[in-house]
Amino acid sequence: MSAIEKHTIAVLVDNEPGILARVVGLFSGRGYNIESLTVTETDRANSLSRITVVTSGTPMIVEQIKAQLSRLVPVHAVRDLSAEGPHVERELALIKVAGTGEKRIESLRLADIFRARVIDSTIESFVFEMTGSTEKLNAFINLMVPLGLVDVSRTGVVAISRGAARF
Amino acid sequence: MATEQMAGAEMIIKALGDQGVDVVFGYPGGAVLPIYDALFKQNHLRHILVRHEQGAVHAAEGYARSTGKVGVVLVTSGPGATNAVTGLTDALMDSVPLVCLTGQVPTHLIGNDAFQEADTTGITRPCTKHNYLVKDVNDLARILHEAFHVARTGRPGPVVVDLPKDVLFALGTYRGPETVQHKTYRPQVTPDAARIDEAVALIAAAKRPVFYGGGGIINSGPRACALFAELVRITGYPCTLTLMGLGALPASERQFLGMVGMHGTYEANLAMHGCDLMIAVGSRFDDRVTGRLNAFSPHSKKIHIDIDPSSINKNVRVDVPLVSDAGNALEAILAGLKARRFKPNQEALAAWWKEIEGWRARDCLAYVGTDKVIKPQYAIERLYQLTRGRDIYVTTEVGQHQMWAAQFFKFEQPCHWMTSGGLGTMGYGLPAAVGVQIAHPDALVVDIAGEASILMNIQEMSTACQYRLPVKIFILNNQYMGMVRQWQELMHGGRYSESYSAALPDFVKLAEAFGAVGLRATRPEDVDRVIKEMLAVDKAVIVDVAVDEHENCFPMIPSGAAHNEMLLGPEDKKAAGPVSEEGMVLV
């Protein structure tokens, strides 16, 4: 058995009804993994959306995933960012922490260290906004657990290639 | 450029005409009444009324596969669309170009659980190549032309166009097909030149090569079949074909080893196992072909020509992938071989053929004849012999009879053999035969059937009789779901759970009830007589051939076994011992 690899794949699609269902249905129907998925329109003039999906599988499976995605009629292009060279990945999270006293102060101090912003506050809670790599977000969220973590909302990974090249 | 104002329903008729469609297979209902009204007012488009929507799709498949054209289906919303799903899935698996128009409730009712509403685009998304929901009549013409383009180009497949009833009434602008250019869809149809060079070098250097051809050659068209036959002939290399590929090379060619796979011939499977170069053309390394993957053709380099990039390296890793239309790739390979003044390695090839002839001498399709009971193989052999030289098209249902037909009927031309390969749909053969006969009114069309399968779409006898289609249904009646029984015998200790065909109808009377002719054979000496009678009748005929109830289909690669672990007959079954646990879970 070949090793399981994690790949970040960007898919440029026509922004038409049902396109997300096509992509998600392809993954579930063929038993592929979705670790995270983000989608929104990125080019209004040409009505294009960009889907970023983080998936995992053996090299043969990852190759299949790309071939199957390319086969969907409304798909313009598929890029395996993990395989095609350097790229940057970011994720955004909104993290709600409730508490008072020392724990509250400690959460604020850690937020400062991690460069999270406070975007909502009551006398017994904060909502932090934070962007960064998945690992950084995980680390911060783990630290918040004993300090009164209440709720987390994450966007999933968005990614783009480094350098001047277009999609 | 043709732009005219018209209602959606009229636009559909116009678009079908502009796409060269002459026949539609369908069944009316509330949501498509405007289209049926438009059909009524014209006379260039012929509508064939089926008796069940699944039959409409299979009939369109038979039409498409025997003509190379796109088959067209028209069904209503809700149950009309859901009944079409099996046929659409069948067409997707076997790469058959279809456009299926489905009615839909009016746009303002979509999502309201309206009468005869179903989420057709949602349901058919995974069983079509693509689908559309038309919400604006001004998109309708473009979408219809796109649907035909998507269905017929690249790897062909079914396309659904879902049509809300209000769109059928609305007035809009019609555009001709020449104005439509798809935004994204550009299948790769010409091969990469560097890859062709690699393939040519491998072909030239091979010592133990085998061609492994599939339905992709036939889908590519007569030119691809001719080029394939030329390549096989000039190399002198042995050639096997998949179930879907039968007819791509004339079966009478000495170099043809017979079908490959689970019920393929001994020589074909051992050649696949022992080759040093496999040249796969329009075939997809399906599990029925490969057997156990980790023991599949262990010592060969593999060239794979396929128009669908996702077919390449899906099951088996290949050395030279060639994404291309089969015809274009074969042409380039032939040119490459000619340019390098290719001469096969005669010495190595002679040794390879000697080995293959040794396997061939085992005569793996031999069966023990008797004068007491009709052997199913004998019935098909006689059918073949007594119809030789005629323009004959054969369809099948699914099961033992299908495999025997594939083994014993010899196809000299492409597009004359219609069977459900990928999905294995019982009930395919009769409606497919209806579609074939509509396309070829003067040809002989025979559905080789089993008594269980035929009952799955028997209602299409009405369609055959309504249009006076002289289709011949040749039932090998062993009173069992034969393939189910065979697997139960091999893997489940002979416990024939629910596989006995109890309470069968009298097929002779059934034929008569539909207005067709019924014939029966119960002894070997009856077989020739009923076949001749069947051929003499210019009407639909059901022939009920009572065959040996216990005959099994051999050779066989048991599930989970490799090509070199074939069972040649019932004696091998005992010698081979029980099927492995891994094999048991396979289908």
Image (cartoon, coloured by chain):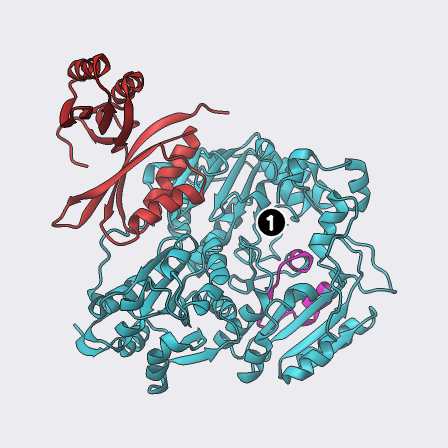
Residue sitting at the far right: B372
Residue A112, horizontal then vertical, whole percent: 15, 15
- Left or right: B111, with B355 as reference point: left
B253 lies above or below B107: above
Q: Which image quadrant: the C terminus of chain B?
A: top right
Q: Which image quadrant: the N terminus of chain B?
A: bottom left
Q: Which amino acid does label 1 sit on?
A: Gln
Look at the image and give the residue range highlighted in magenta.
B380-403
- Left or right: B446, with B80 as reference point: right
Label 1 chain ID: B
Residue B397 magenta? yes
Q: Which residue is at 14% across, 24% downward? A: A118
Secondary element at image label 1:
loop
Name the foreground residue: B108 vs B363.
B108
Q: Which residue is at 25% across, 68% downward? A: B140
Q: Is residue B561 visible?
A: no
**Chain A's shade in the image?**
red
B43 lies above or below B131: below
**Chain B's shade in the image?**
cyan
Residue B367, horizontal then vertical, whole percent: 79, 54
Q: Mark 1 points at which residue?
A: B255
